[in-house]
Amino acid sequence: MATEPVVDGEEPKLSAVEGLKESSRWLRGTLAEELAQDTDHFSDDAKQLLKFHGSYQQEDRDARKTRSKEGVGKHYMMMVRLKLPGGKLTSAQYLALDDISGRHANSTLRLTTRQSIQFHGILKANIRQSLRDMNAALVSSLGACGDVNRNVLACPAPLNDQPRLEAQRLADAVAAHLAPRSNAYHDVWLNGEKLSPDAGQADGVEPIYGKVYLPRKFKAAFGLPHDNCVDLYANDLGFLAEIANGRTIGYNVTVGGGFGRTSGNKTTFPFLGQALFYAEPDEVVQAAESVIKFFRDHGNRGDRKRARLKYVVHDWGMEKVREVFARDYWSKPLRLPRELPIAGTDLHHGWHSQGNGKSFLGLSIESGRIKDEGALRLRTGLRTIVERFKPIVRITAQQDILLGDIDSANRPAIDQLLVEHGIPRPESLSQVRKWSMACPAIPTCGLALTESERSLPGTIDELERTMIEMGLADEALSVRMTGCPNGCARPYNSDVGLVGRSGDKYTLFVGGSTRGERLNFVLQDLVPRGQIVPTLRKLLDRYKTDRTSSESFGDWCTRQGVEALCGTLGIGLPKPI
Ligand code: SRM
Ligand code: SF4
């Protein structure tokens, strides 16, 4: 993929969203007034501000054709995304959220690729009550979307080891420190008519962000070199632990990761985070604030397609970023980053002893969608287990769920409940299914060009059969699909990436890994869905005979290179996409 810099020139004209943020009275805009109106949707301006409160206005795209024929217009509905640092919930919170999904949403809970939960299908008339019910369970959606710091990731495995406990603690601290301070969320959704003192235009309400917040979304994660389950390098800001004698002694601070791109626009591309400096554990919160202020001041506020921190890092180069950061944003001498290679990723599936006398169980959730369908009564089964055994609940960045702090004596009873509800134990699933991810796409996502969550399971069924036939069933192969190039299921660093183009056609990427330390590359564009597995089969055939003993599919594809792989497929080199 081309990565063309944009040459520094005159300050670009500010994008419309900048003016909207500035005049929003700290994220209020007309939200309260529009909420009081008896309409089924918000105005375009309110829709933008709604994102900062954790909600997107969507429409049911399945209903689009018939409704337009009937002349009844769009079926509007809201998506609400929570902010759950490190993916943590108590059992009571999980049950409250499950209730809300049944009462106000579409009776599903959607675990996200950033350790959170989304609700789909909430009507405007019910959104205030939904958010109130969430807040009653001490869960908030403030800042889950919008131009602020999003959900902070950390390995969710409830193991009693210092690096994970520390990462969880610091994820909470960074999330709290970077949370928007405006009282707009309380005023609009929780307080009714009462306005808080910062409802006017007083300055200083947002000491870190200021009136115009960030140029764009900002994402942070804490990662471990031996377990990159958070996909650290896909984040604007990463803290990669250096571990000695079982304890974290410091962090490489990485900047500029991000995956979104726009088809046909070569100045947009996925980019991996780069190490900027090394911080001691007690410098982490300050480091997060300093990086976010650097982004606030230097991010592009004219072109939202190029507004992420990755473009500053790419266009300036690390030397200039380091120089400006050290001069203007970090008051001490800047320590250079250390050599911390990524060695693996753990899905945390199955039963594990926590190291404190308790156990946790990791379950694979297809595309993160918790619902009851046919014989698979996932939602009811999880609810029953959580009600009865009151585990802590953790969500992974691979869209899966962990149930922890369980008395080991209860393992057989929980296994029995899984069987009764048709929920597969991860050991019974193929590797390729466990490592797969898909974004929601159609019918809820307004940006989707193709199916994804509804399409990937069929592709995985076919690939699974093929891999069994070929004797490759034990290979950990990550396949990630998205309905457009924005990259929500992180298809740009997996072994296989399938990125929606239009209709049933996808761009095929290969050459990443389950470790997430390397971008994959385009192999073929506009592959019809029915041709995906036959195409992969030809490559897997060669892989089977050519690979070195422990070489993964993505490693092998990288060693072969695009020319050799195109030769294997009998196709020309891919054109720039
Ligand atoms: Fe995403 C937009 C879903 C993780 C890059 N993302 C969207 C929206 C809100 C569509 C929209 O703007 O109208 C999607 C809502 C779909 C729906 O119906 O629910 C959406 N993104 C998701 C989730 C739910 C996918 C999933 O399968 O879990 C993930 C929610 C994470 C969370 O809990 O916060 C999600 N999105 C990601 C990731 C992965 C990550 O962060 O690790 C990425 C790539 C990393 C990155 O940010 O670069 C990602 N989403 C985008 C982009 C491209 C942004 C860019 O700067 O280029 C968009 C489009 C945009 O922002 O304009 C987008
Ligand atoms: Fe929507 Fe595209 Fe993200 Fe999928 S990748 S959820 S289609 S924005």
Image (tube, rainbow, N blue to C red):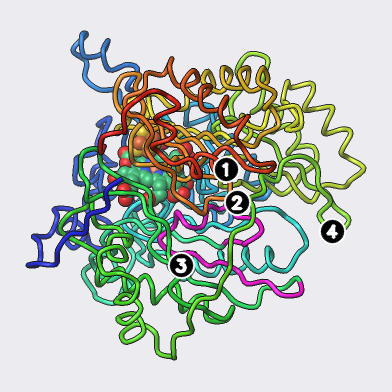
Residue 318 horizontal/vertical position (percent): 35, 72
Q: Is residue 68 visible?
A: yes
Q: Dividing the image into four equal quarters, which quarter contains ligand 2?
A: top left
For the residue marked with disc 3, what is the amino acid? Thr
Q: Which residue is mark 3?
A: 254
Q: How far apart are the alpha carbons under marks 3 and 1? A: 21 Å
Q: How far apart are the alpha carbons under marks 1 and 4? A: 23 Å
Q: Which residue is mark 2?
A: 229
Which dot marks residue 398?
A: 1
Of the numbered discs 2 and 1, the one sitting upstream in the chain is: 2
Q: How far apart are the alpha carbons under marks 3 and 4? A: 30 Å
For the residue marked with disc 1, what is the amino acid? Gln
Q: Is residue 543 above or below residue 30?
A: above
Of the numbered discs 2 and 4, the one sitting upstream in the chain is: 2
Residue 269 horizontal/vertical position (percent): 30, 49
Q: Which residues lie in the magenta part?
A: 223-245
For the residue marked with disc 4, what is the amino acid? Gly
Q: How far apart are the alpha carbons under marks 2 and 1? A: 7 Å
Q: Is residue 485 magenta?
A: no
**Count of numbered labels shown in the rendering:** 4
Of the numbered discs 1 and 4, the one sitting upstream in the chain is: 4
